[in-house]
Image (cartoon, rainbow, N blue to C red):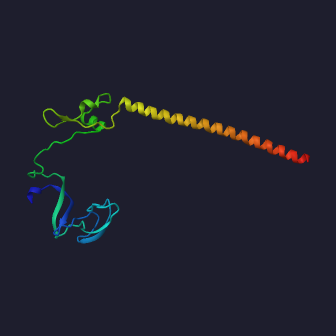
């Protein structure tokens, strides 16, 4: 109709008249029976490792469809009542430190914890997310500790290897001397 003039929609799915869902990747406009396993769309695993053959409809649009799910890709000239006419704010603010910095145009030296978007539950209580990827002194200390541990392990490994090669060469020398003594003893006889 004219109310959708200028709009571009993307088909995201649908059902046929008997209620079978459309499945992405099946390039036909009829029903097919497929063997489903965990991770595939249109299927929820009931038992671990269980597979099931089910009927699904192809993703090509045809006259036998009862419903089509659409996503608005581009907005047109006029608003659609109940869909694009009201501006709904986002329920939650960003959680990751870099995204909070990006939202408020913060410098590196600014403290991100003062800029967290808090959500009001009631008059007394507010809720704020736990900031992820926040660089704290404790985190830097932990990083230094792990680095030093790795370094110490490397140094210890090098030292043990040197000791081993030294002892090995000594042992080989001893064996050579023993063998030479045995040969000399046999020659005397």
Counting every numbered tag in the picture gives: 0
Query: Who's the residue at 23% across and 65% down the image?
Result: 22
Left or right: where 168 falls relative to 20 = right
Left or right, 68 with respect to 137, comes to: left
- Please provide percent x and percent y for residue 130: 28, 37
Query: Viewer-proximal residue, 183 or 73?
Result: 183
User: Is residue 22 toward the left or the right of residue 187 in the image?
Assistant: left
Q: Residue at x 18, y 65 (%)?
A: 15
Considering every residue shown, the one lying at the far top of the view is 109
- The quarter of the rendered structure image containing the N terminus is bottom left
User: Could you tell me residue 128's position as x and y percent?
Assistant: 23, 36
In the rendered structure, the answer to whether residue 38 lies left or right of residue 169 reads: left
Frontmost residue, 183 versus 16: 183
Task: Please name whichever residue, 29 or 6, is drawn nearer the observer in this view of the structure.
Answer: 29
Please tell me whether residue 96 is drawn above or below residue 138 in the rendered image: below
In the depicted structure, whether residue 29 falls above or below residue 146 = below
Image-quadrant location for residue 91:
top left
Q: 174 or 165: which is nearer to us?
A: 174
Judge whether 2 appears above or below 89 on screen. below
Residue 64 % position (x, y) = 17, 70
In the image, farthest residue toward the right: 189
Q: Position of residue 17 (x, y in %)?
A: 16, 69
């Amino acid at each position: 109709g004219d109310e959708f003039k200028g709009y571009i929609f993307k088909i995201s799915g649908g059902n046929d008249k008997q209620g079978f869902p459309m499945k992405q990747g099946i390039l036909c406009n009829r029903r097919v029976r497929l063997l489903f396993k965990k991770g595939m769309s249109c299927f929820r695993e009931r038992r671990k490792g269980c597979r099931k053959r089910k009927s699904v409809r192809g993703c090509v649009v045809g006259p036998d469809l009862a419903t089509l799910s659409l996503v608005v890709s581009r907005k047109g000239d006029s608003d659609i009542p109940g869909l694009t006419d009201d501006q709904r704010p986002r329920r939650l603010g960003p959680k990751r430190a870099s995204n909070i910095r990006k939202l408020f145009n913060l410098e590196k030296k600014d403290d991100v914890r003062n800029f967290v978007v808090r959500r009001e539950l009631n008059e007394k209580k507010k809720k704020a997310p736990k900031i992820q990827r926040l660089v704290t002194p404790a985190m830097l200390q932990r990083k230094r500790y792990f680095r030093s541990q790795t370094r110490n392990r490397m140094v210890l490994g090098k030292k043990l290897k040197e000791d081993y090669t030294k002892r090995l060469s000594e042992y080989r020398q001893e064996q050579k001397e023993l063998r030479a003594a045995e040969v000399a003893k046999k020659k005397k006889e």
